Image (cartoon, helix red, strand yellow):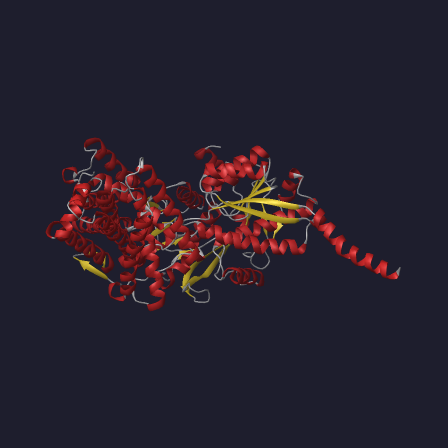
């Protein structure tokens, strides 16, 4: 196996991992802080994409579309949290209600998208500046894939800074540890929940928009990313932001090198990794850092 | 008295047609289509085509003034589709089962058709099994199966592509994807073509990210990449492969569903030129009045051009109507089966001088296959490329192949 092939496959894995991370990070953030397993997270991935598509029809500018798509997905997320999810917090069998409600939103958002934009596939082109490819040694890497990797790393850096260096970030971490105590100390916990839900769904939207020029914009696309994202979250540890990053990197690279060396087993490998983690460390690889919830 | 007679005449004139309509039978067809998610476009397009065909059929008339009516339900999954199919037969009194996008669901529903002895016209799913090793006499198909596509593909590779030996394959990891490779290899072997398979890649259906597959394929360096995706998976793969320069390094060969209009439309200017594709219906081939009229009718009804799936549904309704006309009613199922066997049915995709027909032994529609390459053509927006440079493969060279059916039965069982 020559070095260039290893580099090419590694970068492919990194590109896969970053898109997985962007979806999974929002999913795990919602679980960690808001204590909701949001099955509809993929629907915000879908909504962000369609908002961007609509803006591009009007302004034909990817960057404007990206900005509006991210904000739009976040706003819809906050509306859903305030009007619906907030009503089931703390109920008996809250988990069952979460499952039913978030699953209902998958169906509703999918049908709303189809009703507004139609069933046919849509296209979101790459921005002109990112159309080409770069050569790293003898390895060809599309500029757009590098852009996705860079955006993923920037999100990681921003999240690290926000969660560890700012007061607001500390409040978010505190609310994931003991929201009742935080409330008694005078913090507006419901507001934190809403904002976290909004930021997380905006990240889902961001992932969808970044993926759109490489993938098919179609109703149902949100459902397709949620399973892989769940696997990433299970491997990293439910509710653990850094676990989502580690899980995404593992899955991305396992898939990438699996395809190279044993293509027949490539799709099974991610599940094998998940099963091994569940047996050896059922709480996820970064469970020590996993936040508790009350 | 005269005034009374005129009044009676007027009342009779109003009531008599009403009585006839009241007495005329409505023949129900129970259809199942994927209406949500990625496959939803095929269901929606089939629904539009069904409406067009129903208007044509009912305008032309059926024996006894009967009318056709179609009920459509989202098929969801095999278990659900089976329960709906049974309800169609027992509660709704449907005389025909109809439609279905997925081969997996088609295989489940054909068992219902067999059990209840109700004719099932499959309009989209292409798994060869249904008209081969899983054949049952109440099943008919109004669109071609994957074997017909791949056998035509084998001829194309033998005659049109020079200086190649190594092929790699990528297709979805389920029966539809697996069968295409098996069928192409069988066809190439049958034609005496020497080749070497240097890689097989099996991503899951609806895989969103093909990046790692693309770099692995480029490492394997085949002369020809054979592709077995459909719909959105084709779009994603091509979008992701293009910046890697894959299309300049190997021939891209995708002849069952690569040239589907919805993929051409979604890719727009991103579609590479000169790649080898086909589909079960082309909006720009043949350039006959019948195909043009069908495509324009669809456009007028839906505001968009049809995907391939629509034609199967359109033809299927006409097949049923023609059988009812031959038999005189929709109640004698055995006579309807006989009427459909060998039936000639003019399809939009038939080139001049050819009429599609139902093979009496397998109940598979037998059609000419046209394989082309992508060329610039913006007459069907939003597509910027359509297929051109078509090579035509005679229908009877492609189906039936009882030798292949025997082979398939050995490999996959009955």
Find residue A135 and report its horizontal and vertical position in percent. Answer: 19, 59
Looking at the picture, tell me which residue is in the foreground, A192 or A15.
Answer: A192
Name the quadrant containing residue A139.
bottom left
At horizontal 54% and vertical 50% (from top left) the residue drawn is B313
Find residue A171 and report its horizontal and vertical position in percent. Answer: 15, 48
Looking at the picture, tell me which residue is in the foreground, B270 or B187.
Answer: B270
Quadrant of the snapshot with the N terminus of chain B = bottom right
Looking at the picture, tell me which residue is in the foreground, B183 or A65.
Answer: A65
Q: Residue furthest left?
A: A165
Find residue A130 and report its horizontal and vertical position in percent. Answer: 25, 63
Name the quadrant containing residue B56.
bottom right
Residue A275 seen:
yes
Q: Residue furthest bottom?
A: A59
At horizontal 53% and vertical 37% (from top left) the residue drawn is B110
At horizontal 46% and vertical 38% (from top left) the residue drawn is B78
Q: Residue furthest top?
A: A279
Q: How many marks?
A: 0
Left or right of A199 in this view: B206: right
In this rendering, the answer to whether B1 lies above or below B403 is below
Find residue B308 and report its horizontal and vertical position in percent. Answer: 48, 54
Residue B218 seen:
no
Left or right of B334 in this view: A262: left
């Amino acid at each position: 196996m020559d070095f260039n092939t290893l580099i090419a496959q590694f970068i492919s894995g990194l590109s896969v991992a970053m898109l997985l991370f962007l979806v999974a990070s929002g999913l795990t953030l919602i679980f960690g802080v808001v204590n909701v397993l949001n099955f509809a997270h993929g629907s915000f991935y879908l909504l962000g994409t369609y908002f961007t598509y609509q803006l591009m029809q009007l302004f034909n500018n990817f960057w404007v579309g990206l900005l509006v798509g991210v904000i739009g997905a976040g706003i819809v997320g906050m509306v859903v949290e305030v009007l619906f999810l907030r009503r089931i917090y703390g109920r008996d069998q809250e988990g069952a209600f979460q499952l039913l409600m978030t699953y209902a939103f998958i169906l509703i958002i999918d049908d709303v998208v189809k009703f507004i934009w139609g069933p046919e596939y849509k296209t979101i082109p790459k921005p002109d500046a990112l159309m080409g490819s770069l050569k790293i040694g003898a390895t060809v890497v599309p500029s757009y894939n590098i852009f996705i990797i860079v955006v993923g790393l920037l999100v990681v850096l921003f999240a690290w800074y926000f969660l560890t260096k700012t007061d607001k970030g500390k409040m978010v971490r505190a609310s994931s540890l003991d929201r009742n105590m935080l409330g008694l100390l005078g913090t507006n916990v419901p507001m934190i929940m809403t904002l976290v839900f909004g930021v997380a769904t905006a990240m889902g939207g961001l992932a969808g928009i970044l993926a759109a020029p490489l993938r098919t914009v179609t109703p149902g696309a949100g459902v397709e990313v949620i399973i892989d994202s769940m696997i990433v979250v299970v491997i990293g540890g439910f509710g653990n932001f850094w676990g989502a990053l580690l899980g995404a990197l593992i899955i991305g690279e396992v898939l990438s090198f699996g395809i190279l060396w044993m293509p027949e087993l490539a799709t099974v490998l991610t599940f094998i990794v998940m099963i091994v983690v569940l047996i050896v460390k059922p709480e996820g690889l970064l469970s020590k850092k996993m936040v508790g919830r009350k | 008295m005269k005034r009374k007679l005129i009044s009676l005449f007027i009342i009779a004139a109003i009531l008599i047609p009403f009585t006839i309509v009241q007495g005329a039978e409505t023949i129900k067809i129970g259809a199942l289509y994927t209406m949500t998610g990625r496959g939803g476009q095929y269901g929606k397009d089939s629904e539009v085509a069904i409406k067009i065909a129903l208007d044509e059929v009912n305008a032309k008339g059926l024996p006894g003034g009967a009318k056709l009516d179609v009920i459509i339900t989202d098929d969801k999954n095999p278990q659900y589709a089976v329960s709906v199919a049974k309800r169609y037969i027992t509660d709704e009194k449907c005389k025909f089962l109809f439609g279905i996008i997925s081969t997996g669901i088609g295989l489940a529903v054909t068992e219902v058709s067999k059990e209840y002895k109700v004719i099932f016209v499959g309009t989209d799913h292409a798994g060869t099994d249904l008209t081969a090793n899983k054949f049952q006499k109440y099943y008919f198909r109004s669109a071609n199966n994957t074997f017909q596509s791949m056998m035509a593909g084998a001829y194309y590779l033998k005659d049109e592509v020079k200086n190649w030996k190594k092929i790699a394959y990528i297709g979805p990891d389920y029966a539809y994807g697996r069968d295409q490779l098996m069928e192409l290899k069988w066809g190439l072997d049958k034609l005496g073509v020497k080749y070497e398979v240097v890689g097989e890649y099996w991503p899951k259906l609806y895989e969103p990210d093909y990046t790692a597959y693309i770099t692995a394929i480029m490492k394997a360096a085949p002369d020809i990449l054979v592709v077995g995706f459909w719909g959105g998976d084709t779009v994603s793969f091509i979008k992701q492969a293009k910046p890697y320069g894959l299309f300049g390094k190997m021939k891209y060969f995708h002849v069952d569903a690569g040239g589907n209009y919805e993929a051409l439309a979604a890719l727009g200017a991103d579609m590479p030129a000169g790649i080898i594709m086909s589909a079960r219906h082309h909006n720009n081939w043949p350039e006959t009045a019948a195909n043009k009229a069908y495509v324009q009718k669809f456009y007028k009804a839906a505001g968009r051009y049809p995907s391939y799936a629509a034609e199967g549904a359109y033809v299927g309704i006409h097949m049923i109507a023609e059988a009812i006309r031959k038999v005189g009613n929709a109640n004698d199922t055995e006579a309807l089966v006989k009427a459909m066997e060998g039936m000639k049915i003019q399809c939009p995709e038939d080139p001049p001088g050819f009429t599609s027909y139902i093979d009496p032994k397998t109940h598979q529609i037998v059609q000419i296959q046209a394989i082309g390459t992508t060329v610039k053509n913006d007459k069907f927006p939003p597509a910027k490329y359509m297929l051109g440079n078509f090579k035509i493969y005679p229908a009877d060279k492609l189906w039936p192949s009882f030798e292949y059916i025997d082979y398939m039965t050995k490999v996959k069982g009955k």
